[in-house]
Every structure is written in C-alpha cells, then in structure tokens.
Image (cartoon, grey):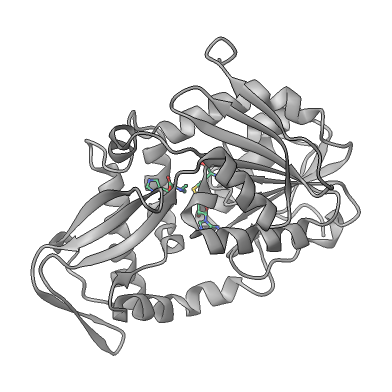
C-alpha cells in the first residue's frame, strides 16, 4: 500500500465499530453496576473536547509527557533504525508524534491508528503536508480488536508508539492482553515507546479529571449525547452529573455519570431504568507505580529497555523491546534537564 489519501479501514474492525455500539451500550447499561466503554467517547466532538482537556491547567498529563518527550527524543532516536515505520496507537491529533518524527528523520513511514475517523483524517492530512517525504498510512479502527499492518511496512524496522497513558484506560488484564497482541502485530525486533501516568496524590489527580471549567464534565456527558444521536435514544443528558473518584485500591481515577433523579430512557427496543444516585461508570484511568508497570509490560511479552520518569507531576515514558532479559536502564529527568 502507498501513501493513502483516504482512510484505510482495518479489515476486521472498521464496520464492527458502528454495528457493535448498540450491543455494547445495552450490555453495559443492563449490568447490575452500569458501565459504558470509554472508547466510545471519541466521536468528532469527543475528540475535540479531549484536545481542549489537554490545554487545561489541571490536566498535567499532556504537558508533562510532552516535556519529557522533548527531553528524551534524541535518546530515543538513537535506537531507531534507518527506514523505520512508526505505528501509533490512539494517535488523536498526532501532536506528540511530531517530537519523535523531528528527532528521527530516519522514520520513513507513519501509521496512525485511531477509532475517531475525523480526528485521524485531519491529523494524517496535517502530518502529510508538514512531513513531505514521510509515507502516511492512517488506519481507522479499534485497537482492542484484530489489526493488520499494511504490507508496505512488513520488511521495515518497526517502532510502536502509545503515548498519553491511554494504556491506563484498560483494566490490568486488558492491558496485558493489549501488550501481547501489540507484540504479535509489531513483531520480533520491534521497539515500543509507551507513555504511562504514575501514581500521585489525589489532590493533583482529582482536579485533572474534574476541572473548574467543566470541560471534562462535557467530555463525559458527550457520551450520552452520542448515544442519543447515533442510537436514537432518549437519555436526559442534563439529568446526569459528572463525577471523578480516586479508587485507591485499584490505583485509578474513575469517571462516573450519576443520575440526578429516577428516570427511564429508551435505547433501541429497551427501556433502561435509572434510580436517583445510580452510577454509570464510564472510564478508568490507571496511575501506575513504575515497578508494577514494568511487571505488566513483561506479562504482556515485552521487556523494559529504558524507563524515563519526570519530576512531579510524575509521568513515565518506557522504551520496550522484544529481546531477552538485561538490566533495565532507569533515568529520572530532573527539572534542570526539562525544557
Ligand atoms: N495519543 C494522543 C491522544 C490520546 S486520547 C495523546 O497522547 O494526546 C486517546 C486516543 O485513543 C483518542 O484519539 C481515541 O480516539 C483513541 N482511542 C481510544 N480507544 C481506542 C480504541 N479502542 N481503538 C483505537 N483508538 C482508540
Ligand atoms: C486518553 N486518556 C488517557 C485520557 C485519560 O487521562 O485517561 C482520557 C481522559 N479522560 C478524562 N480526561 C482525559
């Protein structure tokens, strides 16, 4: 395949994203503890709201990881082989990608993968116009499903990229499964650069997920707006309150939508009943201890080659490879090194 001007659906998943939405919503809202999968946040408006979250003073995640990547991009570049293909999971606006591409002109092919078609096509277009010699092959699809890489990259050195701590949106068993499937997809000899947010005080975490301007609340409620629009449902969006909770036992922030009254909504052919105070659990965002993250990575078939961690607010970027055991190199990036 060559540089595509249109988005290439991953063969197994693109159509199932739409057709499984109703099933997933009904399954989640029929459970004793109601849930919705967080991957459905990202319609066009959800992707726009996520980018607005990234600009919030309370949401330290994006600026912290960006500063760390700026600092370590030359070190990462030294590991990237000539003619490499960069495969990014959950690429969104592909903003952090630029730091990798700028430091590693030896990357010749870029494959952004995202479930949000609008965000993906816009990002692919701007990357194409800013990096003229880079072949860009966007894949729209669900990275929790089966993925295939285009044949054009199969003989190239492969570098995976999964920034943003999107890994933290998986439950631990799902994260392990993701790593195992990414290992099979990227293949022997691949490198994998993964960003993971680290555990810190709830006083820092909670405002990051419940900001003063209500942008995160709008992001959370937009899931209900999307269900109403795409599934013809009758949820009263204003009758659900956004809530962020720190779950210490699971080391994660949870986002909830809390029904402010007794209500019944029609979704498809079903009537879904909510009692006052009932919760829809919409997202988990795990915050790791570095050793626990390394153990997770290893259970998923990777080895941590180098781990970089920032000063507070702490964030980790982990360079993974597929080789046998060897000592992990740990670098703590202090303020003096950060830009
Ligand atoms: N990498 C960017 C964006 C992170 S937001 C950053 O670091 O800022 C998470 C991104 O993952 C969104 O663009 C969303 O659309 C995408 N995403 C979430 N779940 C997904 C899934 N199951 N399959 C593919 N993409 C997914
Ligand atoms: C994409 N993901 C890592 C974000 C997070 O921090 O869990 C999504 C998000 N949810 C609320 N704010 C941002």
Q: Is 192 displayed left or right of 338 in the figure? A: right
- The percent coordinates of residue 223 (x first, y second) are 33, 62
Relative to 189, does residue 312 appear above or below in the rendering? above
Which picture quadrant has residue 125? top right
Query: Residue at 84% of width from left, 47% of height from top?
Result: 323
Query: Residue at 61% of width from left, 52% of height from top?
Result: 296
Residue at the extreme top? 336
Q: Is 28 displayed left or right of 295 in the figure? A: left
Which picture quadrant has residue 129? top right
Relative to 323, does residue 95 appear above or below in the rendering? above
- The percent coordinates of residue 283 (x first, y second) are 38, 57
- The percent coordinates of residue 179 (x first, y second) are 66, 57
Residue at the extreme bottom? 269
- The percent coordinates of residue 230 (x first, y second) are 36, 72
Query: Residue at 69% of width from left, 63% of height from top?
Result: 181
Relative to 20, does residue 126 appear above or below in the rendering? above
Q: Is 137 displayed left or right of 263 in the figure? A: right
Q: Quadrant of the N terminus?
A: bottom right
Query: Residue at 63% of width from left, 21% of height from top?
Result: 71
Which picture quadrant has residue 310? top right
């Amino acid at each position: 395949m060559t540089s595509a001007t249109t988005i290439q659906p991953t063969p197994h998943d693109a159509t199932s994203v739409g057709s499984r939405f109703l099933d997933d919503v009904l399954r989640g809202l029929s459970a004793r503890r109601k849930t919705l999968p967080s991957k459905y946040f990202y319609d066009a408006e959800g992707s726009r709201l996520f980018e607005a979250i990234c600009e919030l003073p309370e949401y330290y995640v994006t600026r912290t990881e960006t500063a760390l990547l700026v600092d370590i991009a030359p070190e990462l570049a030294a590991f990237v082989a000539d003619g490499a293909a960069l495969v990014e999971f959950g690429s969104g606006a592909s903003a952090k990608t630029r730091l990798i591409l700028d430091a590693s002109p030896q990357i010749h092919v870029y494959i952004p993968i995202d479930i949000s078609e609008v965000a993906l096509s816009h990002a692919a277009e701007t990357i194409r116009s800013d990096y003229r010699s880079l072949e860009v092959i966007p894949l729209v699809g669900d990275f929790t499903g089966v993925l295939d890489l285009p044949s054009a990259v199969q003989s190239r050195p492969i570098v995976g990229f999964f920034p943003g701590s999107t890994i933290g949106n998986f439950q631990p068993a799902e994260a392990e499964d993701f790593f195992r499937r990414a290992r099979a997809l990227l293949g022997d000899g691949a490198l994998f650069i993964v960003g993971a947010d680290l555990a810190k005080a709830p006083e820092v975490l909670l405002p990051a997920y419940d900001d003063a301007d209500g942008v995160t609340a709008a992001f959370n409620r937009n899931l209900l707006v999307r269900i109403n629009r795409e599934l013809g449902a009758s949820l009263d969006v204003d009758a659900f309150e956004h809530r962020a909770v720190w779950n210490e036992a699971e080391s994660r922030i949870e986002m909830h939508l809390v029904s402010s009254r007794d209500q019944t909504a029609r979704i498809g052919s079903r009537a879904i009943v909510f009692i006052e105070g009932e919760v829809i659990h919409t997202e988990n965002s795990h915050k790791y201890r570095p050793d626990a993250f390394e153990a997770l990575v290893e259970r998923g078939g990777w080895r941590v080659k180098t781990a970089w961690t920032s000063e507070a607010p702490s964030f980790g970027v982990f360079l993974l490879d597929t080789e046998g055991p060897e000592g992990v190199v740990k670098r703590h990036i202090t303020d003096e090194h950060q830009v």
